[in-house]
Image: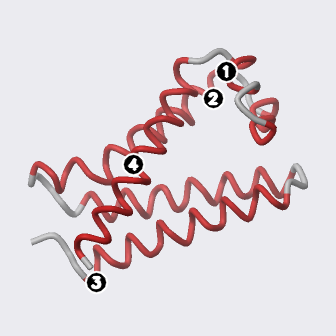
Amino acid sequence: MNTALWIIAGILATGFVIGGAALLLLPREKYRALGANQHWVDDFDNGHLKTIGTIKLIGAIGLVLPAAVGVAPLLGPIAACGLMLFMSGAATTRLRRNEWGYMAGDIAFITVFALLAWGRFAVAPFA
């Protein structure tokens, strides 16, 4: 189970680092052009987008770095809980915009973060 949790955390962290970096580095127009599901950026100003990118980046780092270096490994499952709440906000935005298919993807992320948090808190905590 430990290996599976590491793989899940690594995949999620990689994706969220890429997503956070894209929000921080790309202008709004280029980010919106990345795909049809990126038009949610129209609902937020540039400061909000930078904040969202920063939260994604910090959350992704928190999933793996504390446990990898052995300093405060409890931060890993706490980061998973934080990203679960973050994705709840994303699902709320999708709900507001009537983007039901994309909201299903956000709910899938919420479920995987919940599994990761449960796995690290109860099933295979870091020593």
- The residue mark sitting in front, 3 or 1, is 3
Density class for disc 2 (Cα within 10 Å; few <14, some 14-19, many ≥20) is some
Q: Earlier in the sequence, mark 3 or mark 2?
A: 2
Q: Earlier in the sequence, mark 3 or mark 4?
A: 4
**Picture quarter with the N terminus:** bottom left
Q: Residue at x 32, y 54 (%)?
A: 63
What is the C-alpha distance between the residues marked 3 and 1? Answer: 39 Å
Q: Position of residue 14 (x, y in %)?
A: 40, 44
- The residue under label 3 is 122
Q: Are marks 2 and 1 in contact (CB under 8 Å)?
A: yes
What is the C-alpha distance between the residues marked 4 and 2? Answer: 19 Å
- The residue under label 4 is 13
Q: Is residue 53 above or below residue 101?
A: above
- The residue under label 1 is 46
> Of the residues shown, which amino acid type is indicated by label 3?
Ala
The answer to whether residue 7 is left or right of residue 69 is: right
